[in-house]
Image (spheres, rainbow, N blue to C red):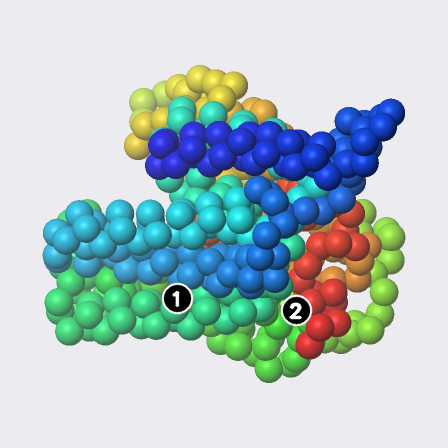
Amino acid sequence: MFGFANALLLALVLAAGVDAVLALRAAAPGRGRCRRALAGLWHTPHLLFGPWGTAARLRAGEVLFTVGLCCYEVSVAFCNSMARDAWPWVQGVLAPALDWAAFLCWGAKILLGTRYTWRELTVAGALYFIARWVHFNSHNIFWIGLVVAVLAAKDLDLRRALDAFLAVGAATVVLVMLLNAGNLLPPAPDLAGERNVTEIRLTLGYGHPNTFGGLAFGLGLGYAMRRAARPRWGDAAVLAVLGVLIWAGPASRTAALACLALAAGLAFCRLRAGAAIPRAAARVYAAAVPALAAANFLLPLGMYKNGPGWSDFGPAWLSALDNLLTGRLSMVWLAYRLLPVKIAGQMLPDWPALDCSFVYALYQFGPAVAVLLAALLIAALWGYARRGDRVLVFCLLAMLVYAFMESQSFHLTTNPAALLLAGAVFGQKPERWLGGKRQAESI
């Protein structure tokens, strides 16, 4: 996807040049013509490459985004299952075709189906330049997929896209489960010992319990986003059942806990339906980002490991917490001693495995992106809270709970809530962000 990332950046620069030429031609002659033309571009939303076919392009943009989202969901949910080992064409032919279809759809939506002001284009373009640079160093295709999808989500009513995402995602996951139940998919080699008659931790065709857990949590998160305008008690019950199933089947604890936390959040939203979110509560929601990041980064600093086989491991309370978190703190402790931090990210070795998203972002994407991501999340939580979109706030908080323990939060299929960052990425005021209550106005 390196070629696509470069082509998209060049196309955006070209579009800005075409905009400038068209604006100068349309500006009334006389003194200050250039200034007036540029001021209009800076403040007035407009389609790139001219205003031709405005209505059709905007409708097509929504369709392109939805098609791209569905292609990407199938690519991850099917092509990254054990079907890739059962049939070579899954990874050799189908996955590249679906990935390219998704990226081309999103690229077309970004270039031809979205209105921008030059201010928005400058802010998002600068962030995209940094993200592209990091992608070149990290080689993380999930990262560039997440970034391009967020750019393509600008000004979209996500309801139809989420409907398609949920339908296609659920159908694909069920298909993989049926193939696995029919013994058409091989077990993962490194987990073969766990696959017995009872399968203590079910892999369900995905090779690892947490892969299935992440996909299932992503569907739950998408469902909550879809129901954000009018949450019901039944919606909380659906998410609670999903959380229990994730815990009982693959025993993916992080995904299950995040799903149950989201269910509790929706129940709270139903209790507080119609009530405004106090400013103090909005501050608490936004403070969750630095609080969880501080816990991820600072807790391992208090650990010590000495002696053969780290027989002297303490203090006792941190050792117990590390066991509860299945060694996450130990992996961060090792990363501090074994891995360098690079300004624009890097490819990470297989060991130590960094599952905590906050620390993972620092090492995989670099400190600049880690800080930018934290700032965008804080802005999104604050903005949605001040707007009164309590469900969307809890969607972001549930994602943070998941991110505390897993790095799959950078997969769009696990974290569709990343699409809620689009307004912040483009530097828009929260009143212009789509989703939740604003989305309900058009129902």
Q: Position of residue 136 (x, y in %)?
A: 40, 26
Q: Does 81 sit above or below residue 41?
A: below
Question: Which x, y percent locates residue 339?
Answer: 41, 20
In the rendered structure, the answer to whether residue 403 lies left or right of residue 171 reads: right
- Name which residue lies at 22% across and 54% down: 94
* Mark 2–mark 1 distance (CA, rounded to whole Å): 19 Å
Up the image or down, 112 lies above or below 178; here it is above
Three-letter residue code for mark 1: Gly
Residue visible at 55% across and 30% down? 13
Q: Quick check: marks 2 and 1 in contact, CB under 8 Å? A: no
Toward the bottom, the furthest residue is 234
Residue 418 visible (yes or no): no
Quarter of the image that includes the C terminus: bottom right
Q: Position of residue 307 (x, y in %)?
A: 36, 21
Question: Would you say residue 196 is visible in this rendering?
Answer: yes
Instruction: Read off the residue under disc 2.
Output: 228
On the image, numbered disc 1 is attached to which residue?
169
* Mark 1 nearby-residue class (10 Å; few <14, some 14–19, many ≥20): many
Tag 1's secondary structure?
helix
